[in-house]
Each structure stands twice: as structure tokens, then as C-alpha cells.
Amino acid sequence: MAGIRPDKKAAAMALCSILSEIDTGRYVSPSELTVGRYATTWLATKRLSPSTMAMYRRYVRLHIEPNIGTMPLQDVRPSTLAALYRKLEESGRCAKGHTGEPLSLNTVLKVHVLIGAILQSAVDDQLIALNPARHPRANPPTARQVRAAKPEMLPWTRMELRAFLRSSGQDESDHLRYAWVVAGYSGVRRGELLGLRWSDVDMANSTISVRRARVEVRELGEESQVVEGLTKSGRARVAGLGTESITLHDVSSCLGSSVRPERVNEAYTESYRSAYERYREACERLV
């Protein structure tokens, strides 16, 4: 192509590049659509549980929108994401009283997974040619790094559990004291405990069937709501109660005031909101 002026030569090269991208199915038309606008559209099309949707919206609002929300999708590079993740790790927390503190590696990884899903959808919509979140240079925290950063779990011994249950059982103002017995000897999660029904209890074999969980979902500017869904694993399971410790009275006291239709919302909402705080206070009394 000797003799062609530089501007014509550059145009010819650009044309060849575009034709090649069209032939390989990688061509995308120029667009100024931003990450924030596309993320909002993407969320509106998803079929997710209320708790997952609330989490995704929170991540977009707190971590994606303020940092790369105004950036055109086509300008996002692996280095853009790597810089975002490092920033979040250093000062990404937004919780009241903790603003500017480091964001946990676990949460940073979840933000990365969400960004990856959004950008992959943009690829599928032919808005970008490649997903920069899938490039090694995006460099999010690895699952191994997340596990290493988590504090070591030190479960109670049998004697420590008995001491805790004895302590909480003596506090008649704690209306959840029987729930701690069921949770302590069955190992169910908090949401699973709140989702128990009488039909799940088999006292003859000292077992409970864990089929569902109840969790509180909060959205910014909206009233919180308690929703019922699958367990964390998505599968039902049977948990033993421990014949030496669980009695029918314990289970009936745990379930009795919660399963009556007229008190379902009130009882479950109150129980969920206060469960962790009461659990922590009882642990402090034990220490």
C-alpha cells in the first residue's frame, strides 16, 4: 500500500480490522452506554430471590456505581477492575461507623463475580467484544485468599454449650431461650431455625427436617420484609436433635408462638431482628 497518504493508510487498516471483527463475530458498534445504566437494566431482567436481589443492588449502589458507574462499558479494561478491587480492599467499607475501612476479601470477590456477570451479559448483548473481568489482569482476590483471610472458627465444646444453654435458660426474659437449645443441638442456621414448622419435627426419632429458611430483606428507602425461601444449600436435610438434651417442651416453646397464622409476621420479624443480638449478649454473659 505504498504511496497512500498516512490518513488513508490508517483508515484502510481500520477498515480491515473492522471487517475481520465482523467475520469473527467480535465487532461491536461504538456506544457510550455506561456501566451504571447497564447494571440497572441487567438487574431489572434477573429472576432472583429477594435476598440475592437486595445484595446485588447494594453492591451496585455502594461499590460499582460510585467507582465505575459513569464509565462507558467499552472503556472498562482489566486494569480498571484491578484498580477498583485494590481500592475496595483498602477503603471500601460503607457501613455506618466504619466508612473508609478495608472491605473484606470475601465481599470484594462477590463484587467481582457480580461485575463479571454484568459484563458477560454485555458481551452477549454485543455491546462489548470481550469480558475484561475474565482476564487474568483483573486480578480479584482468589477463593484461597478469601479462606485464608477468614478468622478461624473455634466451635464450643459440649461443656461450653451446656454452660451457655444453662445461662440463657435461667433468663426468663429471653423468649428465645428454647430456640438456643434447638439450634445448639441441631446445628441449624438462624434462618433455618426461624423457618421450622411443626410438620418438620419428628420427636419419635429426635430429628427435624430442614426444608426452608426465613430471612429479613432490607432495601434502601423501603420497609424491611421477612421472606421465606430455600436453605443456603438449596437442599432439604435432616438434623438430629440429640435425645439427651431436647424435649418436646423445648421444641414446642420454640415453635409454639411462631407458627400461629395471626402472629407469623410479627413473631418471625421480631425473632430475626433480635436473634443475633441476644445470642451475642448471652455469649458475653458466659465469658
Image: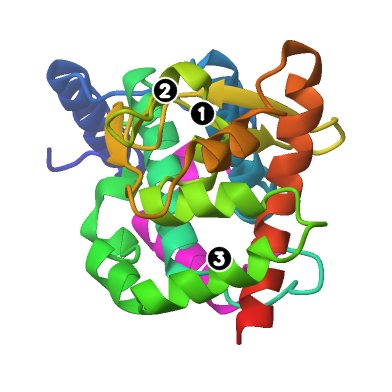
Residue at x-position 46% and y-position 46%: 189
Crowding near pointer 2: few (<14 within 10 Å), some, many (20+)? Answer: some
Kindly identify which residue carries mark 3: 165
x, y (%) of residue 84? 51, 63
Q: What element carries label 2?
A: helix
Q: What element carries label 1?
A: loop
Q: Is mark 3 on a helix, strand or loop?
A: helix
x, y (%) of residue 192? 48, 37
Kindly identify which residue carries mark 1: 196
Q: Residue 206 carries which label?
A: none
The reply to whether dot 1 and dot 2 touch (C-beta < 8 Å) is yes
State which quadrant residue 212 falls in.
Answer: top left
Q: Which of marks 1 and 3 is in front?
A: 3
First in sequence: mark 1 or mark 3? 3
Magenta segment: 71-94
Crowding near pointer 1: few (<14 within 10 Å), some, many (20+)? Answer: many
